[in-house]
Amino acid sequence: MCHCGENRPFSECCEPIINGQKKAETAEQLMRSRYSAYVVVNTKYLIETTYPSQQKNFDEADIRAWAVANQWQKLEVIASQKGKPSDELGEVEFKASYLDEVGTLRTHHEKSTFVQENGRWYYLSGVIGGTKPLLSTQNRNDLCACGSGKKYKKCCGK
């Protein structure tokens, strides 16, 4: 079964998305495929699916080292907000359980924000743990979280 927790074979679920044969249609689907990419250590996919203006903040060697050092156990999607094919923004809260390099069970709890541009979903940012919703904190006169330089109301908040 797929690493992301869906009850389908990896070859029919996340693998075609990771390999570029199919696109993620929702923010949650992208998040699930990114988790699977950590499991199979596909760092190229992880960087390519990060919002272009944010890619410079991620080091491929660091991502690879972290993905390899851990034994990924399971993904639990807690909640999704927006992120449908017709949306421009989406939020997915999840917990990724893994065994670290010394065998201690750890949980990575994150609320991630995703943005869709030109029919493609990208990971934009994440907040580790916490309970504050990401999308509802965007004021319409703030600069948009997607990094466009426009006000939210003129960009993703339309």
Image (cartoon, grey):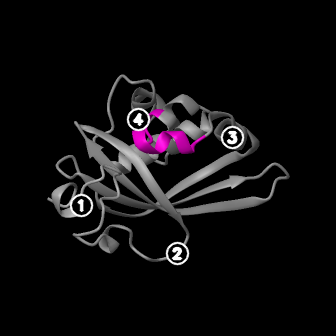
- The residue that mark 3 highlights is 62
Q: Which mark is residue 13?
A: 4
Distance (Cα) linking label 2 and label 1: 26 Å
Name the kind of residue labelled 2 in the image.
Answer: Gly
Query: What element does badge 1 sit on?
Result: loop
Q: From mark 2 to mark 4, how far is it between C-alphas?
A: 29 Å
Q: Nearer the viewer, mark 3 or mark 4?
A: 3
Indicate the quadrant where residue 134 lies: bottom left
Side of 156 relative to 127 (left or right): left
Q: Could you tell me what secondary structure mostly forms the magenta stretch?
A: helix
**Dot placed on the residue nearer the N-terminal end, 2 or 4:** 4
Residue 37, magenta (yes or no) = no
The kind of residue tagged 4 is Cys
| Dot 3: element | helix
Give the distance between the C-alpha atoms of the residues marked 3 and 2, in whole angstroms: 24 Å
Q: Which of label 2 and label 1 is nearer to you?
A: 1
How far separated are the C-alphas under marks 1 and 3? 33 Å
Q: Which residue is mark 1?
A: 151
User: Which amino acid lies under the numbered mark 3 shown in the image of this protein?
Assistant: Asp
Q: Position of residue 55 (x, y in %)?
A: 49, 40
In this view, the mark in front (2 or 4): 2
Judge depth for marks 3 and 2 and give the one in front.
3
Residue stretch rendered in magenta on the structure = 48-58
Say which mark, if any, is on residue 67: none
Q: Is residue 66 above or below residue 150?
A: above
The amino acid beneath tag 1 is Lys
Please tell me which of labels 1 and 4 falls first in the chain. 4
Q: Earlier in the sequence, mark 3 or mark 4?
A: 4
